[in-house]
Image (tube, helix red, strand yellow):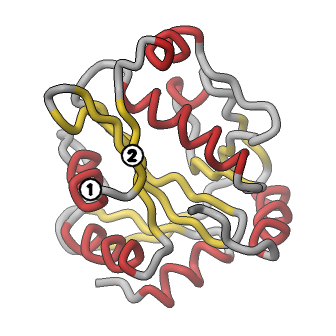
Amino acid sequence: MISPNILLGAYSIGYFPMAEGDSNISWYSPDPRTIIPLDSYNIPRSTKQLIRKRSFRIELDTTYEEVMRGCASREETWINEEIIASYVELHRLGYAHSVEAYDAEGLAGGLYGVAIGAAFFGESMFSFRSGASKVALAFLLEHLSSHGFRLLDTQYMTPHLKMFGATEIPRNTYIEMLRAALDSPPRFV
């Protein structure tokens, strides 16, 4: 397991871990870095429709490890057992959080990440049913915005994140934003 102090220290200077296979952990701090600005994000029309239809019930932190395992359940993953154990410990300590989307069949999708100060580091998302992770992300954006968060780090750009207003910024700009966000008190829940 990666110790909580090492993980929190790495996040606070712009690094995050990814597993390569079952035993190797590498550390990354990409340039450019992808963020979703919390003052100008976009909720896609199709996601707004799912929200209006109440297609999914959203919960926070109810099945954290199950969400991590959902994120890891793909052909290629950077989430191994060491990563799961490390982040479950961060969750136990109050730093790691999950957003879960449920439907009549159970857990339909979700996401997880780490909150330090007014920064949230989005780690991974998954959907067992269409649109579930998008509704979870929309909830997260509203939640972070309403709780005074200043930074949503999504690490790398994807087409999915771009629909929500994700943008790439230079690493040095990211580090400045990170420092400012870390100086603010924690407010996730």
Residue depicted at 58% across the width and 66% down the height: 115
Residue type, label 2: Glu
Q: Position of residue 146 (x, y in %)?
A: 72, 47
Judged from this view, the residue extending furthest toward the left is: 105
Residue that carries the numbered disc 1 in the rendered image: 63
Disc 1 element: loop
Residue type, label 1: Thr
User: Against 135, is 144 above or below?
Assistant: below
Q: Nearer the viewer, mark 2 or mark 1?
A: 2
**Along the viewing direction, whichever of 17 and 143 lies nearer the viewer:** 143
Quadrant for the C terminus in the image: bottom right
Would you say residue 32 is visible in this rendering?
Answer: no
Quadrant for the N terminus in the image: bottom left
- Disc 2 and disc 1 in contact, CB within 8 angstroms: yes
Residue depicted at 77% across the width and 45% down the height: 169
Q: Position of residue 13 (x, y in %)?
A: 68, 76
Would you say residue 94 is visible in this rendering?
Answer: yes
Q: Is residue 184 left or right of residue 125?
A: right
Residue 168, image quadrant: top right
Label for residue 119? none
Residue that carries the numbered disc 2 in the rendered image: 59
Q: Is residue 157 left or right of residue 92?
A: right
Residue depicted at 36% across the width and 84% down the height: 2
Residue 30, image quadrant: bottom right
Q: Position of residue 183 (x, y in %)?
A: 81, 76
Residue depicted at 67% across the width and 34% down the height: 166
